[in-house]
Image (spheres, grey):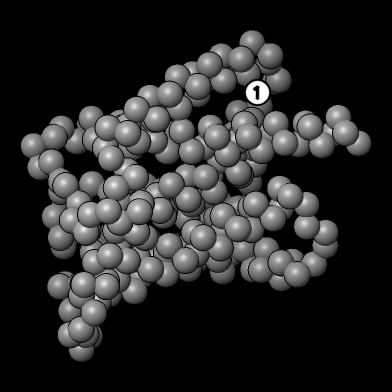
Amino acid sequence: MNLKMMVKLSADIGMTLALLFLMGYQFWGETAHEWVGAIMFALFILHHMLNLNWHKRIFKGKYTPMRTLTLCVDILVLLAMLALMYSGIVMSRHVFAFLPVERGLALARRLHILGAYWGFLLMSVHLGLHWNMILGMVKKQTKLKPSKARSIALFCISAVIAVYGIHVFIRRDFATYLFLKSEFVFLDYSEPKQLFYFDYLALMGLCIFIAHYGSGLCRRKKEVRS
């Protein structure tokens, strides 16, 4: 693995870990939340700088349904991140407190909720759409040979995680925050960290499962038709 690819992978892993950390605001407090948020935005900018070729190819080549879907997800992720960046700066009491921002707190609060919850799901879908690339790197590094039994086992485990992820989505009332039915997020400060992050990993797994296997099914259907 070359240096650029290692930096890319490190940035992506860093963003994923930061995203999970930030969703657990109640465990770490305001100061840590702001600093990790600032780090995540820096990693997001680095991610785009390392993928300049992708930006150059946006208006080139043919747009298949799969490429169109991927682009739409990427644009929505960008919008979610911009909403989080703006609202995070406006509401900041530590990292960006030196900025003379005095208005727009109500709007910033709404944008932060929307950006956080939509951003979490969309970034997870983004991961799922690129899961083949991640699996390819893992196989290359571990030198694993193709195995039908292993593929079936992984699918079954992934399906169980996805089903639990649906349960988490409903139990944690995600739809309320996705559609801003409430402007205040319920935070359970007494909840064990392990349970919270297990749930959010399962929810991330659900999005990855849908995106990965859904895109794979679309590709196979296209191959059959052609």
- Image position, residue 93 (x, y; %): 15, 73
Q: Is residue 213 left or right of residue 38?
A: right
Q: Which quarter of the picture shows residue 74?
A: bottom right
Left or right placement of residue 74 versus residue 224 in this view: left
Residue 223 in percent (x, y) is at: 85, 34
> What is the x, y in percent for residue 40?
37, 60
> Is 113 situated left or right of 65 in this image?
left
User: Looking at the image, which residue sits at the far front?
Assistant: 181
The reply to whether residue 96 is in sight is no
Residue depicted at x 63% and y 34%: 214
**Residue with the mark numbered 1:** 144
Q: Nearer the viewer, residue 3 or 201?
A: 201
Q: Looking at the image, is 163 positioned above or below residue 214?
A: above
Quadrant of the rendered structure where residue 138 is?
Answer: top right
The total of numbered circles placed on residues is 1
Instruction: Please state which amino acid type lies under the numbered disc 1.
Output: Leu
Q: Residue at x 83, y 59 (%)?
A: 62
Q: Quadrant of the C terminus?
A: top right
Q: Residue at x 68, y 15 (%)?
A: 147
Residue at the extreme top: 149
User: Is residue 12 at all visible to an observer of this figure?
Assistant: yes
As displayed, is residue 72 above or below residue 133? below
Position of 3 with respect to 206 (left or right) is right
Q: Residues within 10 Å of mark 1 (few under 14, many from 20)?
A: few
What residue is at 71 percent from the left and 48 percent from the top?
A: 66
SS of the residue under disc 1: loop
Residue 192 in picture, x, y percent from top left? 15, 32
**Camera-side residue of 73 and 49:** 73
Q: From the viewer's perspective, is residue 39 above or below residue 179?
A: below
Looking at this rendering, what residue extends furthest in the bottom direction?
100
The quadrant holding residue 53 is bottom right
